[in-house]
Image (spheres, helix red, strand yellow):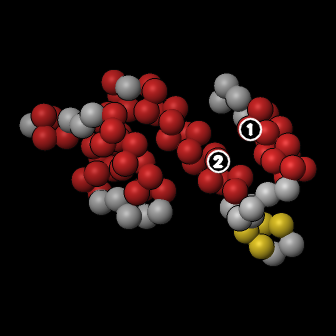
Amino acid sequence: MLKKFKINCDEATTICDKSQYGKATLREVLKLRIHFLSCRICALYTKQNNLLSKILNKSKNGKTICSMTEAEKELMRKELESHKGE
């Protein structure tokens, strides 16, 4: 039965990306969660991907960050560093 839910890392990252935008099905999300039990790398990828999206979606003057100045890039680097190891 669990064989139906077994996926490889490529499929896991695709599902991760889809779920981030609300496009993954319940079955896909379950497959992803099961995959996390045996693959810490994909779990970390998902966590970092979600964090990056969260940082990028922060508003600046009511606008979502789409292109960044050097100062904004540096701020993002600092933000990512502060979450390192979570």
Query: Residue 36: x percent and y percent?
Result: 38, 32
Instruction: Find the residue positioned furthest to the bottom.
Output: 62
Q: Give the quarter of the figure containing the C terminus.
A: top right
Which label's residue is closer to the chain start, 2 or 1? 2
Q: Residue at x 19, y 40 (%)?
A: 5
Query: Tag 1, which secondary structure?
Result: helix
Three-letter amino acid code at the position of disc 2: Leu
Pointers 2 and 1 in contact (CB under 8 A)? Answer: yes
Q: Residue at x 59, y 39 (%)?
A: 48
Left or right? Give the position of 7 relative to 58: left
How many residues crowd around disc 2 within 10 Å: few (fewer than 14), some, or many (20 or more)? some
Q: Give the quarter of the figure containing the N terminus.
A: top left
How many residues crowd around disc 1 within 10 Å: few (fewer than 14), some, or many (20 or more)? some
Left or right? Give the position of 72 relative to 32: right
Q: Residue at x 81, y 47 (%)?
A: 73
Left or right? Give the position of 16 relative to 53: left
Query: Residue 29: x percent and y percent?
Result: 33, 50
Q: Residue at x 30, y 42 (%)?
A: 11
Vertical order, 19 against 2 (above or below) = below
- The residue indicated by pointer 1 is 80
- The residue indicated by pointer 2 is 52
Query: Tag 2, which secondary structure?
Result: helix
